[in-house]
Image: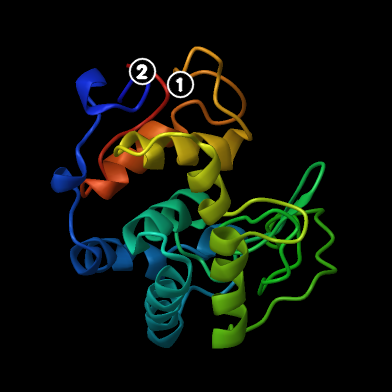
Amino acid sequence: MYTGNGSVAAGWPAESQWVSFDYMFTANTPNMLASCAQWGVPNNSDDETADIKTAIQSIASSTGVDPRFILAVIMQESTGCVRVITTQYSVFNPGLMQSHNGTGTCNTNSAPINVPGVSATGTVQTPCPYSEISQMIEDGTAGTASGDGLEQVLQKQGNSDVSMFYRAARMYNGGSIDPSGDLGKGCCTLCYASDIANRLTGWVNAPHGCTL
């Protein structure tokens, strides 16, 4: 687990330590293909998973956001399940990147549909069309009318070295960076930025958590 402000000086990985996008996608594909069962919905097909890759590359090109960063957030938010549930707290967080009131989703249910007593009144799309997969990634990367995507938090986080990605991850998850600059402080998943750093350097199934 990485701690501190996201800088190489604080021990966080330099961009030269990141794996390639193709390596990262291939390494994570088995998890994507098995990721939907936890929600009681059909697992990704090979075509749906291939569509995730195509959409990431397209949206990375149009937004200028590194495709590896997009993929890391997808794996963190949904394990790449195209039919992930729509989380609902103060806002709706649908789709592969659990975006801020986004429109892209292939599952409008807010809970796993295989849990006894859960009323599954939402819509589940199987197969999940490319248009929805692309919209999910567009919502999470380019942002929505009501909330930031990766493109916006990268612009707002204030740094130009590799820490920009780890700081942006902290903002995407928790909304802001603690005044101390410590990426392990603040709201929500305190090890989120550290997990993203691990994913960018090739982590797939190693133990992880929010304690040293």
x then y, percent, for residue 92? 77, 54
Amino acid type, mark 2: Gly
Q: Residue at x 62, y 25 (%)?
A: 187
**Sooner in the amino-acid sequence: mark 2 or mark 1:** 2
Question: x and y percent of residue 25 in the render?
Answer: 28, 66
Residue 194 position in % (x across, y down): 36, 32
Mark 1, other Cα within 10 Å: few <14 / some 14–19 / many ≥20: many
Q: Which mark is residue 4?
A: 2
Say if mark 2 contacts mark 1, CB within 8 Å: yes
Pick out the residue farthest to the left.
Answer: 16
Where, by quadrant of the figure, is residue 138 drawn?
bottom right
Q: Quadrant of the N terminus?
A: top left
Q: Residues within 10 Å of mark 2 (few under 14, many from 20)?
A: some
Q: Locate residue 170 relative to residue 5 in the image: left or right.
A: right
Residue annotated with mark 1: 184
Mark 2 or 1, closer to the camera: 2
Name the secondary structure under disc 1.
Answer: loop
Q: Which mark is residue 88?
A: none
Quadrant holding the C terminus: top left
